[in-house]
Amino acid sequence: MGEEILAYLDHNILDSIRKGDPHKIKELVRELKLTPIYSYENLKEIKRSIGSEDIFLNLLKQLKAKFIEPILESNLLTGSAKIQDVDIFDVWKWFIENEDPMPEYGYGLTSMLEKFYGGRSDESFSDIFVKGSEELKVLLNDALKNITVQDSITEEMRAAIESLPDLLNEQYQQISRELDGQEQSPVKAFEAATGLGALVLKNIEPPNVVEKVFEKVQKSMEGPELDIDIFFGVKPQPSEANGDREKTLSEKVNGIYHQLNFLGYYRDTGMKTPRGFVRSSSDMTHAGVASFCHLLLCRDEGLVVKAAAAYEYLGVKTKIVHFQASKKINKGT
């Protein structure tokens, strides 16, 4: 990536520039000769900023920002990324033409997590899994329509693919029966059982945040010893698909970020609403992608502290620059 100093821009940084640049980000970029970086997740946030899309795109153009794209092989992250110096409006055109928005239930996963936090109170977990399976069935059927005999797929393979949603739904029903039998959301039930949650975990101070949180979890739970790396998603669960594949650094960051948020360490607000869940997911993704860069510029305290905890635990060299209302604080690891 050359001698450039790559500075990843969280969307709230772009928003602050749009609103008058109180932190003088433009001046900082120019004086320190930083290379601003944006990602696919930034484009998704710009799309959600209805009515202000061109403002954000022009800001990125003025900043001469470059596009970062993680490299995939066989639809799996490789742990590498490429930086592209391309016109932002060309990238935007490509994004609009190729974006495949997540369906309402996120194939069951997104809506399940919303309900974990107390959302979707008018639906059972069983309802959610059924509707998520239907979304998956539509996706697979659309994909199969574009597969021909020349693509080397047998009728047996086609039948197996078509049966996958129903098979998953059957497996999910046992889980849903257990979850639907609870009087509280899983997050509230966990907090009641362990005595942990936002009020307790927010008092944990660096360094070694991940280890300190894990120690509290261990002390609050009876049963076998937990593996810290498996617990925080750094290593895959034994039953996980591709369980022998080592996760990439950005995936490890995302795993720690998600678990800290679930446990209540500076938990993002509004998690039980679709909008709040999407916002939290974007922050997590920004933290992961920023691990490819030298700097993460951010205004969101929750993102900063969770990303800093993950970076410290994993030895990520990315430095976090946290901009606040009156001052700038470097909370890098």
Image: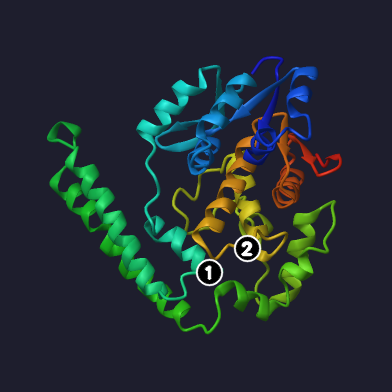
**Residue marked by disc 1:** 116
Q: Is residue 106 left or right of residue 257?
A: left
Distance, label 1 to label 2, CA atoms, is 9 Å
The secondary element bearing badge 2 is classed as helix
Please tell me whether residue 234 is drawn above or below residue 98 in the rendered image. below
| Residue 237: image location, x then y, percent | 53, 57
Give the numbered dot on residue 58: none
Residue 113 makes an appearance in the image: yes
Please tell me whether residue 179 is drawn above or below residue 75 in the rendered image. below
Please name whichever residue, 79 or 190, is drawn nearer the observer in this view of the structure: 190
| Residue 53: image location, x then y, percent | 51, 34
Q: Is residue 290 left or right of residue 183?
A: right
Q: Quadrant of the C terminus?
A: top right
Please tell me whether residue 131 is drawn above or below residue 178 in the rendered image. above
Q: How is the image coloured?
A: rainbow
Residue 222 makes an appearance in the image: no
Q: Residue at x 71, y 46 (%)?
A: 307
Q: Quadrant of the N terminus?
A: top right
User: Which class describes the residues within 10 Å of circle 2: few (<14), some (14-19), or many (20+)?
Assistant: many
**Residue marked by disc 2:** 262
Amino acid on which the number 1 mark rests in the picture: Phe
User: Which class describes the residues within 10 Å of circle 1: few (<14), some (14-19), or many (20+)?
Assistant: many
| Residue 252: image location, x then y, percent | 62, 46
Q: Check whether the beta carbons of the residues at disc 1 and disc 2 lie within 8 A of each other.
A: yes
Q: Residue at x 56, y 57 (%)?
A: 276
